[in-house]
Image (cartoon, rainbow, N blue to C red):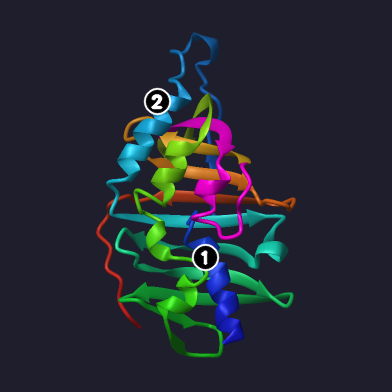
Amino acid sequence: MRRSIVFASALSLLLAVSGGCTDRGGDDPAGQDAAPLPEAAELLASAATELGTVKTARFVIATEGAADSLGISAAEGVITAAGEAQGTAKLEQAGLPLELSFVVKDETLHVNGLTGGWQKLPLATAAAIYDPTAILSPDRGVANLVGKTTGSTKGREEVDGVDTYRIEGTLPGAALGNLVPGVSADVTGTLWIGADRKLLHRARFPVPGQTGTVTVTFSEYDAPVTIRVP
């Protein structure tokens, strides 16, 4: 059960801010002749509203210089507004790499890679540390976080083929704490908001109290998702 709790703790991070994040392009190549960048407050407010309507999304997580402190080095999968999830994660436990597959459905956590074969655990085992329904919750999830972030628009960039605006600012600890257990202080981070449909496509922020960073990419918003129990 101790290993299950360790996994649940790591799952709380990988599902919250809920690898493979590659910058494509930089600041607006048009430079000084380009149209003025939209105000960050307007972009963030629009994104908060739009994110509140999302039903499904795909996420990819990468850590840099923080794998030891977080216990996770990479993760990817899909999540739903109903609190279901499916994916894989690369963790570190006692200095050793650990690769897991997980499924969250019908108030049950299924995990493969802890002891060999699939294990079925009550979702309350993980929810005692983190509630996965918070991820896409309009009141507690990424919509709430984006809506309460303050900052300024720094440029226009492409993220995995999507035209976005890059916003640098303050992510409030109270909102981030709903998604990353243990976080209570504000952090300075960067958000990439879609230029067309105002959705969060990437978030990057430092690990509070550590030297590492976490980068999360969201894509395939509202694509059909079927979560199957193993």
Q: Is residue 114 visible?
A: yes
- For image coordinates 57% across by 79% down, the residue present is 5
**Where residue 108 sits in the image (x, y, percent)?**
37, 79
Residue under the point 65% across and 63% down: 70
CA separation in Å, label 1 and label 2: 30 Å
In this view, the residue in front, 125 or 221, is 125
Q: What stretch is highlighted in magenta?
A: 163-186
Label 2: few (<14), some (14–19) or many (≥20) C-alpha neighbours in 10 Å:
few
Residue at position x 57%, y 32% in the image: 168
Disc 1 on helix, strand or loop?
Answer: helix
Give, as a three-letter code, the residue at label 1.
Ser
Snapshot quadrant of residue 198: top left
Mark 1 vs 2, N-terminal side: 1
- Residue 160 visible: no
Query: Is 53 left or right of 201, judged from the image as shown?
Result: left
Q: Does the magenta stretch include residue 35?
A: no
* Quadrant holding the N terminus: bottom right
Residue carrying label 1: 12
Does the stretch in magenta take in 172? yes
Pointer 1 with pointer 2, Cβ within 8 A = no
Rendered position, 43 above or below 72: above
Quarter of the figure with the C terminus: bottom left
Is 165 displayed left or right of 224 in the figure? Answer: right
Query: Residue 145 location, x and y as percent?
Result: 46, 44
Residue placed under numbered mark 2 in the picture: 42
Q: Residue at x 63, y 46 (%)?
A: 185
Percent position of residue 78, x then y: 38, 62
Amino acid type for the residue under numbered disc 2: Glu
